[in-house]
Image (cartoon, helix red, strand yellow):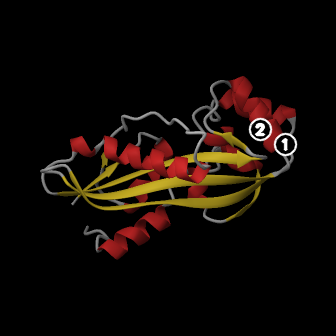
Amino acid sequence: MEIILASTSPQKISLMENIFSNFKIIKPGTKEIFNKNISIKENLKKISYHKAISVLKYCEEGESIIVSSDTVIFFKNTIFGKPESLIEAKETLRMLSGKWHRVLTGYTILLVNGLNKKVLKSFTDISETRVKMRNISIREIDFYLKTGEPLGKAGSYAIQGIGGCFIERIEGDFYTVVGLPISKICEVLYLWGYWPPER
């Protein structure tokens, strides 16, 4: 059974390495574009699904599992994805300081036939976690920005990294905040008969 992670995120790769002894890493060939005419959750499910489908062409003969996900921060009716600059990251962190926000991760698991590039089974859903950031000073934010960690992270922080110093409390799944709800993914694979993996 070939397993493919449709992502080059170091955080997601690390999570997959904890569970699977062997898997492929393929960068998805899609852009994370939000459609204002549908809900955040529907957008995330659509994006994660298209990420998974975009790597289907790379599957080898036989059955393969493709896993993909996409994460955003939602705060005061505003979506915070990956910051485009350190200035944007600083403003995001100032807004989140001392407050609760929601982390939404859309994820998709596909069982596919690599020979004819056909989807045999598909599961797409949303995992949500509430996160409380403690009050953080401008000095702390400036220090954090210098590490470079906020760039490339939804909400401008990495809970599994230095950004974890700012998190006071979470309600829900920790790995949803990291960007890959691994427990939910393994549950689907178990129901499909592909978990636990052979070693």
Whether residues under marks 1 and 2 lie with C-beta atoms below 8 angstroms apart, the answer is yes
x and y, in percent, of residue 109 in the image: 37, 58
Q: Mark 2 points at which residue?
A: 93
Q: Quadrant of the C terminus?
A: bottom left
Residue occupying image coordinates x 71% and y 59%: 130
Q: Mark 1 falls on what kind of element?
A: loop
The type of residue carrying mark 2 is: Leu
x and y, in percent, of residue 33 in the image: 52, 35
Residue occupying image coordinates x 49% and y 60%: 125
The mark closer to the camera, 1 or 2, is 2
Q: Mark 2 falls on what kind of element?
A: helix
Q: Can residue 177 be seen in this view?
A: yes
Viewer-side residue, 34 vs 85:
34
Image quadrant of residue 170? bottom right
Number of other residues with Cα within 10 Å of mark 2, as a class: few under 14, some 14 to 19, many 20 or more: many
Residue occupying image coordinates x 72% and y 27%: 88
The type of residue carrying mark 1 is: Ile
Q: Residue 136 carries which label?
A: 1
Q: In this view, does 75 lie to the left or right of 61?
A: right
Q: Quadrant of the N terminus?
A: bottom left
